[in-house]
Amino acid sequence: LLDNNNLTGHLPPELSSLPKLLILQLDNNNFNGTSIPGSYANMSKLLKLDLSNNHLSGTIPSNFSGLPFLQKL
């Protein structure tokens, strides 16, 4: 849980190297950019990805449809 930490910059693609991660909560920070790294789809056990209240734009990567356990995006 990394919410409400005033984190800035682009979403770090390195987080995708955590394939057993269940929850990635990055809401209420100051991330910016035009895309969510498609490599986040490598987190095959992910249940929740919360990126709300940042400064992101663009589309959700199409390969996220392959995340079988994702319940909240």
Image (tube, helix red, strand yellow):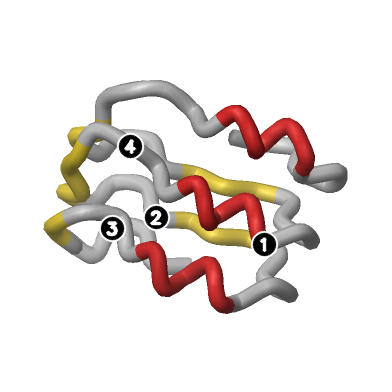
Mark 1 or mark 4: name the one nearer the start of the chain.
4
Please provide percent x and percent y for residue 73: 59, 35
Mark 2 or mark 1: name the one nearer the start of the chain.
2
The answer to which of 73 and 38 lies nearer the viewer is 38
Vertical comparison of 18 with 35: above or below? below
Residue located beneath label 3 in the image? 4
Residue at x-position 23% and y-position 51% = 29
Residue at x-position 19% and y-position 40% = 33
The answer to which of 18 and 6 lies nearer the viewer is 18
Circles 1, 3 touching at the beta carbon (< 8 Å): no
- What secondary structure is marked by label 2? loop
Circles 4, 3 touching at the beta carbon (< 8 Å): no
The crowd level at tag 3 (other Cα within 10 Å; few <14, some 14-19, many 20+) is few
Name the amino acid, label 2.
Answer: Leu
Please provide percent x and percent y for residue 45: 79, 61
- As drawn, the label of residue 35 is 4
The crowd level at tag 2 (other Cα within 10 Å; few <14, some 14-19, many 20+) is many
Please provide percent x and percent y for residue 2: 39, 67
The Cα atoms of the two marked residues, 1 and 3, are separated by 22 Å
The Cα atoms of the two marked residues, 1 and 4, are separated by 17 Å
Please provide percent x and percent y for residue 9: 14, 57
The answer to which of 4 and 31 lies nearer the viewer is 31
Discs 1/3, front: 1
The crowd level at tag 1 (other Cα within 10 Å; few <14, some 14-19, many 20+) is many
* For residue 59, side relative to residue 70 (left or right): left
* For residue 8, side relative to residue 61 (left or right): left
Residue located beneath label 1 in the image? 43
Name the amino acid, label 4.
Answer: Ser
Residue located beneath label 2 in the image? 26
Name the amino acid, label 3.
Answer: Asn
Mark 1 or mark 3: name the one nearer the start of the chain.
3
Name the amino acid, label 1.
Answer: Met
